[in-house]
Amino acid sequence: MSLLATPFTRAVGIEVPLVCGAMYPCSDAELVAAVSAAGGIGVVQPMAFAFVHGRDLRTELRRVRSLTDKPIGMNIILEKTAKAYEDRARIWLDVALEEGVRFFVTALGKPDWVVKRVHAAGGLVYHDVTERKWAERALAEGVDGLIAVNDRAGGHAGRRPAAALLAELSDLGVPVVGAGGVGSPGEFKEMLGMGYAAVQLGTRFIASAECKVHPSYKDAIVRARASDIVLTDKISGVPVAVIRTPYVDKVGTKAGPIARRLLQHPRAKHWMRTYYALNSIWSLRQSIKRANPYKDYWQAGKSVEHIEAVESAGDIVRSFAAAAQ
């Protein structure tokens, strides 16, 4: 029996219940297009276009469209750290809707204004969650589904194992997409077998031919094992999963005592997160100019355990689909 036909694939209009998650700074027009063209759905990260690569969102969306006419999505971060960012996010949303995007993934904050605009255009909004209370709040704002981020995810990982998290969310009446720890076709099939309506991959697609990162980053993912993944507070102020390297060991993984106190303050935490974000953006811009960018932090999840080679994004989607067929 095929596991490919799910409520998610029917709602989004795709063939394979596989999402290439939005990745900062790894998302690129070619990667998004390749995943969608192969039957999954690629998700654009507009901050990567604007702040890392200095590209115009509308131009990049049209570049994706020149490569595939299949559905694509876009990620909207809702953290209100700065009014200027929120204003830009609203513009990005309008541009995406004008260019025909109808699937959106939101994270952090209240997705109410995104839901209102997207639903008016006939689109769908899924929200990143790590536990039930955040899911209930998002559903109260009208989201159509959930991205369940588990404890094996890259980037901002959750705290619960995939099976436990699904059990916590399965009675909420909306499709749930599993995110985290999937690097092989067998793991993809296993997640769908649990009852997830789709699976979101990030790390697996960094180690793809279309992903525009330095070869050393891809090589680090291929060589790493799950035991090499550690959490650091020093990128965004909240734990982020990265590959352990000599540099990570040197600088440590915990924010200093002053930073920790500020991150716990109801108001100061937003300023601290803004500081971390701006510092990260500056570092990434500088790293692109170096011979070995990303040498400081390689974000990745525990799915590295079963990633053995760099492959084309299309081949990755097709091999995963074959396993679930």
Image (tube, rainbow, N blue to C red):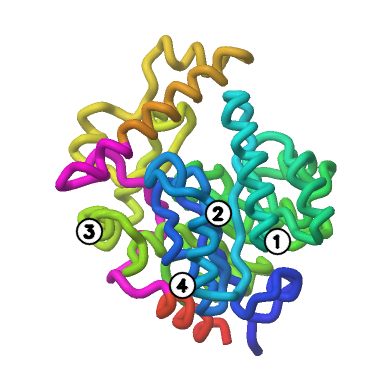
Q: Residue at x 39, y 21 (%)?
A: 255
The residue pinned by badge 2 equals 58
Against 196, residue 81 (above or below) is above
Q: Residues within 10 Å of mark 4 (few under 14, many from 20)?
A: many
| Residue 268: quarter of image | top right
Q: Amino acid at mark 4?
A: Ala
Q: Residue at x 52, y 47 (%)?
A: 46
Residue at mark 3 to residue at mark 2: CA–CA distance: 28 Å
| Quadrant of the snapshot with the N terminus | bottom right
Q: Nearer the viewer, residue 32 or 309?
A: 32
Packing grade of label 3 (10 A; few <14, some 14-19, many >=20) is: some
Who is closer to the viewer here, 98 or 106? 98
Please give the residue where the numbered disc 1 appears in the rendered image. 102
Three-letter amino acid code of the residue under disc 3: Pro
Question: Is 118 colored magenta in this rendering?
Answer: no
Q: CA distance from mark 1 to mark 2?
A: 15 Å
Is 325 drawn above or below residue 100 in the view shown? below
The answer to whether residue 295 is magenta is: yes
Q: Reading the chain from its start, which is encountered first: label 4 or label 3?
A: 4
Nearer the observer, disc 3 or disc 2?
A: 2
User: Residues under labels 4 and 2: Cα distance?
Assistant: 18 Å
Sooner in the amino-acid sequence: mark 4 or mark 1: 4
Label 3's element?
helix
Residue under label 4, please give it.
34
Range shown magenta: 284-313
Q: Earlier in the sequence, mark 1 or mark 2?
A: 2
Quarter of image, res 258: top left
- Residue at the spot of label 3: 215
The reply to whether discs 4 and 3 touch (Cβ–Cβ < 8 Å) is no
Mark 2 is surrounded, within 10 Å at the Cα level, by few (under 14), some (14 to 19) or many (20 or more) other residues, namely some
Q: Earlier in the sequence, mark 3 or mark 1?
A: 1
